[in-house]
Amino acid sequence: MLLNLKKRRRGQVRAIDFVVSLLLFLLMLTQLILVIINVQTGLTTQMKDDLSFTELDTFGRSLLQKEGPPQWGYKQDLPSSFGLSESANLPSLTLDASKIARLITGTTFPISTISGFEQFSYDSIKNLLSLGTDQEFQLSILPLLEISIIITQENDSAYQARVDITNVNNLPIEECTVSFFTLDLTTGSIILAGVDSSGNDGEASIVYINPNFNIPDGEHLSIVIAEKGPLWGIVWDSPSSNTEDILIGRESNAAIWSCGLNSSSLLISDMHEVVETPDEHFLSYIYKNNQGGFSNESITPTFKFKANETVSIPTNGIVAFFSIIKQGDIYKVGIGTFPAVLDNNQNSGEFYNVFGKVEDNLREKTRISKDFPVYIRGTLMKCRIILWSV
Amino acid sequence: MKQKQLRLKNRRGQLQIAETLVSVSLMLILALLLINAANQVNNSYSNTMNLQHAASDILLTADEAGLLRPVVFLYDQIDYYSDYTANLEILTDYIDSSLTANIGFVLRMRTVIDQVVTSEYIYLIGSQANIAVLQQGGEGIIANYFAGSFSSAIYGNFADQYLIDLYLWEKV
């Protein structure tokens, strides 16, 4: 009887079998739905990122690899097409410093007012490059070496300047040639105070004598240029005993700008915001000479608050220029470089603004950035382009 | 008797449904695996494109800045060993500075003889960890570049050709 019952039940299903298979099925179905939702979200983001990346790469190359009309950077008027490349025939990202100079914005006075050279506005570049109204971008150009400086007073006439040199990833850079200059703000003269080489920790230092022997604690700047082949970086500061009297960079409210007139001539223009005529006005500059060292010059312009000076420089190498005015006990020092450093650091007050939108837009949907290694006037820099849609 | 047969029929029908459900579940598992694999391929494609562009830009700009050819020319010249190491260090610093901290690299080269690229690699630069990854078969993202025909006032002329490979990895 029992055997018969077992025989009859063979090939049949119990309720538990059905329940288990149903649960397994439901579990897998739920998993599949979850994975599909997950993948779909991922794919949408991915497609958006892919689109942005492709767009960013194309947009970056239209900025950096197109040339526009030949040598438009030397002309006062703006061209009807745009490109920062020195030559569109070059496969590398080799940029023209004079074209970059036409992107400098946010100076105290419009550049065209003091130099006659028109500047590109952000909207005009967007139009020329056919960037949609829902898209914004930002362009910065930075040296590859980052330097921090500390100046300490050793005694009445001697100071120590110590620098730390790192790359953009904060790793110390050794064996850099580090040139220390002092800029005497009372005369505008620049002196090469010494040269050191950075050690394993990226540190270099010198002890220098106050360049202004007549005045104890005389107002001066210490300027440091570090080089390693075509890599470079620059920094400056004044000793703490001077800081109350010296307004540097953006704090000075000076507009200072420079642009190539041809491959060997540079126009340096400056203008200060003044109520009364300043006591002194100097225009000083340091440039890399053809022998591999640095040369420097100081000019006393005709006008006490503005100047347009043409100077001769070699085809390659960096130029750093300083516009100094003295008003009573206060020194105001505007600083610029050629090639221009377009810096994102709003607090540094030392370099030109980035080009493009600077404020964070809360409505932005995606933000994507890319660093392009660029070659400018025989030196290597980094160009960061950020693109986002709103 | 009829009732018993009907019950038996119902049970067999339930068994068929249960079998079907198990089969469908197995198919769903297979579908899940396939979707996951496709998603991973898609993700890595975007990273690959990004890194490949970066590697090409680094090599092109390095050559324009005159950083590649002195290293290639001097690598086996004992007389210029200190120049070689100095140039190599500049090239390393340049590549390091052009990459974000999470990307590793190895630059290596092969000789080109009679327009044929030899199979033997000569390592140039990269951290030991990165070289180990390459030796263990981690190919990373690669960009190729030919360098040759270098002439210098200091080192003289050089017409040999080398194929430079730059490998990039996203560090784990």
Image (cartoon, grey):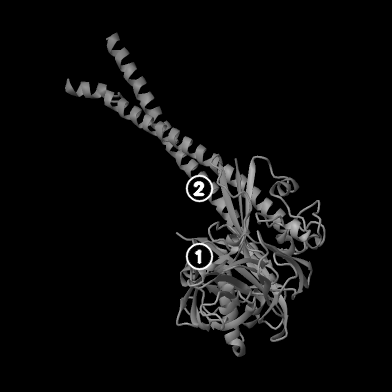
Q: Nearer the viewer, residue A339 or A33?
A: A339
The picture places residue A224, in percent across and down from the top left corner, at: 57, 75
Q: Residues within 10 Å of mark 1 (few under 14, many from 20)?
A: some
Nearer mark to the viewer, of 1 and 2:
1
Q: Is residue A278 above or below residue A15?
A: below
Is the residue A61 above or below the residue B109 in the image?
above
* Amino acid at the residue labelled 2: Gln
Which of the 4 quarters of the picture holds residue B26? top left
**Distance (Cα) linking label 1 and label 2:** 29 Å
Three-letter residue code for mark 1:
Asn
Residue A311 found in image quarter:
bottom right
Q: Local crowd at mark 2 within 10 Å, few (<14), some, or many (≥20)?
A: few
Q: Which residue is mark 2?
A: B40
- Helix or strand or loop: what does disc 1 sit on? loop
The chain ID associated with circle 1 is A
Please state the horizontal and vertical placement of residue B132, each as a whole percent of the image: 47, 69
Q: Is residue B163 left or right of residue A221?
A: right
Q: Identify whether A120 is placed above or below A317.
A: above
For the view shown, which residue lies furthest in the top direction?
A: B2
Compared across the picture, whether A372 is left or right of A197 comes to right
Between residue A175 and residue B21, name the one nearer to us. Answer: A175
Q: Chain of mark 2?
A: B
Residue bearing the label numbered 1: A169
Along the line of sight, the residue nearer the viewer: B72 or A362: A362
